[in-house]
Image (cartoon, helix red, strand yellow):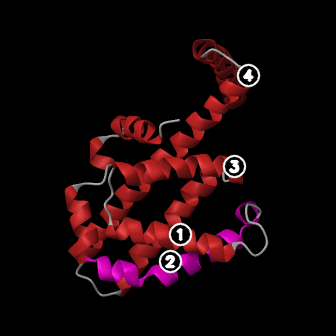
Amino acid sequence: MDLAKLQAEIVSEMVPASLVSAADALAIARHADLLLGMEDVLVADFYDALLAHDPTADVFEPGERPRREATLRQWWRRTVTGPLDERYWAWMGLVGVVHIRRGVRNPMMLSAMALVEDVVHREARAAGLEPDDVDALETAFAHVARTASAVISESYTQSYVGALQALGGLNPKLLANMLAIEIQAIEDAGRASLG
């Protein structure tokens, strides 16, 4: 799978106003020292929350936290120092693939991304930034989180379906038709259950 091509397709489908803008990149760059300075708090809060919740805690192997913390630190530094370019978003596509192997489901990822946003919001306010600067950082990280979440989750979905297609030796058009029939049945059952 070409992750660069996949992330480009995913990002192209997103509403442009939700993507990371030049203003977002400027806000992040302007407050890079503050953001880099919150790394320890971010990492601790992130993994404390994940390990305190049974479904997310079950993803981890005993003693694995230091390695996962190192990965989060790497992501955080790259996110803050940039560039948030095609290579960065392709990396987020790879995260979606890794999540399949690790058993990290999209609700886990989306809620974990919200944790990152919460830390940025809280720490920006606590730092005594001007309200406009706090707003700019909150918007910037909302855009980063939404774009990363879209790329990760859609990469997860497309990779999962692609792997099943390959394992079954199915023609992509045949698989699409089979999925459409099955999804219609699921939709019909869902509508019936909701009355």
Q: Earlier in the sequence, mark 4 or mark 3?
A: 3
Q: Quadrant of residue 14?
A: top left
Q: Residue at x 47, y 66 (%)?
A: 75
- Please name the predominant secondary structure of the magenta segment in the image: helix
Q: Earlier in the sequence, mark 1 or mark 3?
A: 1
**Residue highlighted by disc 2:** 42
Q: Position of residue 11 (x, y in %)?
A: 37, 41
**Residue highlighted by disc 3:** 101
- In the image, the segment drawn in magenta is 31-57
What separation in Å lies between label 1 and label 2 (alpha carbons)? 9 Å
Which numbered dot is residue 72? 1
Asked if residue 187 lies left or right of residue 16, the reply is right
Q: Residue at x 40, y 54 (%)?
A: 88
What separation in Å lies between label 2 and label 4 (alpha carbons)? 42 Å
The residue closer to the viewer here, 180 or 104, is 104
Give the amino acid type for the residue marked by disc 4 in the picture.
Gly
What separation in Å lies between label 1 and label 3 (alpha carbons)? 18 Å
